[in-house]
Image: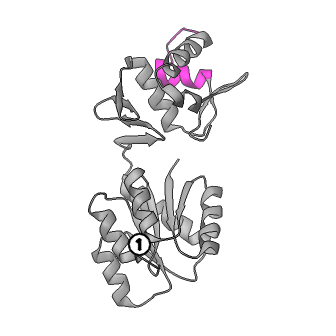
């Protein structure tokens, strides 16, 4: 599930975009000024930032400069300014797309999906961050609130599968096939036991692995 940050000082616009984004399955954070946006980017990893230009305290161009000092998160710049200079300025700062107000929320969502797809280029994310859990998929390491957590190979594969399918109900059969393979002859108790062991290593985030009675499990960062 892609994680969006929407930044605009007009609350009606933030609510409009948020509503459409959540309908499309995005997880959404919002900010109403540039400083708040920079602070949030320092604490969280986002798949896309939708960023207004004209804001008090810190305008969108300045926000973009600050974010680009540390991260390459894709940015769609959103503004009532349609002048060629403003578009060129945005692209020179490294934005990925530019949308002029007034806009179609559906078109904006289509552009958002296209930008994220281009950025990912079909490759799995090298790092997955969900609340205080960070999964480094290159090193096969997991950190809980910054502390490395020792997982067995199966526990790691199980956590990675759950996290990559965050928000999706997964049956025990789904999990067995994905983590143990289609030729594995174990039963549902294998999944339940491994889930129990994994939860024990996630501290307070154990609650993110939600039991779906009679079905299986769902990884939910809002649980």
Which residue is outermost to the right? 214
- Residue 71: where, in percent of width, then height? 31, 57
Total number of numbered discs in the rendering: 1
Q: Based on the displayed image, in which of its 4 quarters is residue 166 positioned?
A: top right
* SS category of the residue bearing label 1: strand
- Provide residue 176's location: percent of width, then percent of height: 54, 19
Q: Is residue 90 visible?
A: yes
Q: Residue at x 50, y 15 (%)?
A: 197
Classify residue 135 by image quadrant.
top left
Residue 181 in view (yes/no): no
In the shown orientation, is residue 215 left or right of residue 82? right
Q: Residue at x 41, y 72 (%)?
A: 97
Image-based side of 99 in relation to 65, left or right: right
Magenta stretch holds residue 180: yes
Front residue of this view, candidates 67 and 109: 67
How far across and how far down the image is residue 98, in percent? 43, 76
Q: Which residues are magenta?
A: 172-187
x, y percent for residue 52: 47, 75
Residue on which disc 1 sits: 97
For the C terminus, give its image quadrant: top right
Give the answer, above or below, for where 33 lies relative to 42. below
Residue located at (53% from left, 29% from top)? 204
Q: Please, is residue 160 above or below residue 17 in the view?
A: above
**Residue ID at (27%, 76%):** 92
Crowding at dot 1, Cα within 10 Å, few <14 / some 14-19 / many 20+, comes out as some
Classify residue 105 as left or right of residue 59: right
Residue 33 versus residue 213 in the image, above or below: below
Does the segment drawn in magenta span residue 11?
no
Indicate the quadrant where residue 107 lies.
bottom right
């Amino acid at each position: 599930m892609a994680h969006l940050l929407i930044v605009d000082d007009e609350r009606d616009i933030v609510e409009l975009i948020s509503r459409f984004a959540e309908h499309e399955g995005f997880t959404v954070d919002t900010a109403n000024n540039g400083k708040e946006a920079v602070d949030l980017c320092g604490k969280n990893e986002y798949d896309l930032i939708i960023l207004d230009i004209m804001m008090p305290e810190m305008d969108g161009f300045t926000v973009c400069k600050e974010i680009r000092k540390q991260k390459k998160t894709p940015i769609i710049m959103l503004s009532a300014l349609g002048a060629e200079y403003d578009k060129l300025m945005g692209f020179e700062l490294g934005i990925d797309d530019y949308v002029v107000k007034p806009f179609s929320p559906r078109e904006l969502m289509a552009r958002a999906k296209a930008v994220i797809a281009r950025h990912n280029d079909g490759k799995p994310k090298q790092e997955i961050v969900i609340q205080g859990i960070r999964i480094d998929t290159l090193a096969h390491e997991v950190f809980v609130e910054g502390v490395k957590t020792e997982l067995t190979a199966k526990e790691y594969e199980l956590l990675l599968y759950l996290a990559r399918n965050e928000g999706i109900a997964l049956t025990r059969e789904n999990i067995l096939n994905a983590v143990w393979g289609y030729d594995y002859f174990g039963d549902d108790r294998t999944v339940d036991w491994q889930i129990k062991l994994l939860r024990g290593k996630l501290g307070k985030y154990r609650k993110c692995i939600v039991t779906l009675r009679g079905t299986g499990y769902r990884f939910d960062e809002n649980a």
